């Protein structure tokens, strides 16, 4: 579907102006849209996951730990696919107002892809370097987005996500270094001229939802404040977008149709996308933090 087709469907949650903003700028922020009852359930899910992580000593396929994580002072960077770990998160991602917000932006037929819970712990929660999402999972078109739900208030000092307005209409940058190794981030030279000086920081009260297109340039700084910044992120596509490489954070929930009908034809967008490493080989996909912080010496799964 084109943006014009999507906009021709009546809005479910967002205003028409918010939908138009998304297509023009590549992101939108809807303040305080998630009901308190859902926020309470999501916070309980977060707390339960933190409890489960306390005694872990190494990052695994679910819990990504910051160096220094200890039982008495847990420091999680991310939980991968919390919707697989906790039924409330899955109910939220698949059946709540969130899927309606996504339908406002990709059209009535919505496919779920994955969830992430990013923590940005107080006192140094790790940065996420500048990147676009789609080179991690190229699809037949670009009707893919990630929605982030603020579980707590997010102020400017808590390292909010920053997005570069309009960058979704620009080039898709390479996420490999000069040796051909995957870094998951855009090289400094390519960032010069990418419009970072225009970046907008997405702040707002708990219950707000930020949405960015898979082509939008984004990142976030280290959180040196004394407040955490837990955000539940969920990625979706239009039902007629199909991946042509293995999906990195695949689970049995990936590709569930959460609104409308499955597509019988792929929509093909001719604009090309760089291909990531083959996530099925070697150690497979690891979280963005592991790649960006160069914590793994085997830099390419197919070399591991
Ligand atoms: O949590 C953030 O600020 C950035 C999230 C993000 O871009 C990612 O995890 O890929």
Image: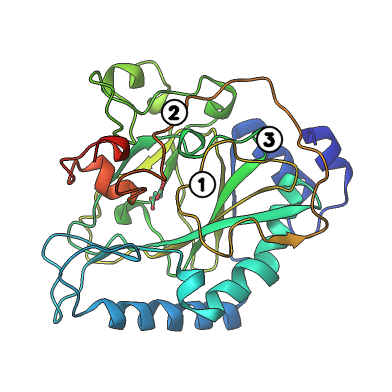
Dot 1 or dot 2, earlier in sequence: 2
Q: Residues within 10 Å of mark 3 (few under 14, many from 20)?
A: some
Image height of 63 relative to 165, above or below = below
Dot 2 or dot 3, earlier in sequence: 3
| Number of the label disc, if any, that sits on residue 247 | 1
Q: CA distance from mark 2 to mark 3?
A: 17 Å
The residue identified by callout 3 is 23
> Residue 64 falls in which quadrant of the image?
bottom left
Q: Is residue 138 visible?
A: yes
**Mark 1 residue element:** loop
| Number of the label disc, if any, that sits on residue 98 | none
**Residue at figure coordinates x 60%, y 67% from the top left:** 93
Do the CB atoms of the residues marked 1 and 2 lie less than 8 Å apart?
no
> Residue 73 falls in which quadrant of the image?
bottom left
The residue identified by callout 2 is 198
Task: Pinpoint residue 304: horizontal percent, then vertical percent.
Answer: 24, 41
Left or right? Give the position of 299 relative to 193.
left
**Mark 2 residue element:** helix
**Residue at figure coordinates x 69%, y 67% from the top left:** 97
Q: CA distance from mark 1 to mark 3?
A: 25 Å
Left or right? Give the position of 197 relative to 4.
left
Task: Pinpoint residue 118: horizontal percent, then vertical percent.
Answer: 37, 60
Q: CA distance from mark 1 to mark 2?
A: 31 Å
Image height of 66 relative to 211, above or below = below
What count of labels does the image hold? Answer: 3
């Amino acid at each position: 579907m084109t943006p014009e087709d999507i906009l021709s469907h009546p809005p479910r949650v967002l205003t028409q102006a918010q939908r138009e903003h998304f297509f023009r700028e590549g992101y939108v922020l809807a303040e305080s849209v998630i009901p308190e009852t859902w926020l309470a359930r999501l916070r309980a899910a977060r707390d339960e996951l933190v409890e489960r992580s306390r005694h872990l000593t190494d990052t695994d396929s679910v819990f990504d730990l910051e160096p220094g994580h200890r039982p008495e002072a847990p420091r999680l960077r991310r939980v991968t696919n919390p919707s697989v770990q906790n039924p409330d998160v899955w109910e939220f991602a698949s059946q709540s107002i969130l899927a309606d917000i996504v339908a406002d932006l990709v059209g009535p037929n919505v496919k779920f892809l994955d969830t992430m819970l990013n923590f940005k712990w107080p006192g140094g929660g790790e940065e996420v370097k500048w990147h676009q999402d789609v080179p991690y999972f190229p699809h037949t078109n670009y009707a893919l987005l990630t929605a982030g739900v603020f579980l707590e208030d997010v102020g400017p000092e808590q390292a909010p996500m920053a997005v570069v307005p309009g960058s979704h209409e620009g080039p898709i940058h390479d996420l490999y270094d000069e040796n051909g190794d995957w870094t998951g981030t855009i090289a400094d030279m390519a960032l010069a001229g990418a419009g970072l000086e225009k970046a907008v920081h997405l702040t707002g009260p708990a219950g707000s939802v930020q949405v960015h297109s898979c082509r939008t340039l984004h990142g976030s700084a280290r959180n040196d404040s004394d407040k955490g910044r837990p955000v539940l992120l969920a990625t979706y596509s239009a039902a007629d977008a199909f991946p042509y490489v293995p999906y990195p954070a695949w689970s049995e929930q990936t590709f569930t149709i959460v609104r409308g009908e499955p597509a019988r034809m792929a929509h093909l967008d001719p604009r090309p996308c760089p291909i990531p490493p083959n996530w099925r080989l070697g150690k497979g996909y690891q979280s963005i933090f592991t790649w960006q912080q160069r914590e793994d010496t085997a830099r390419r799964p197919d070399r591991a």
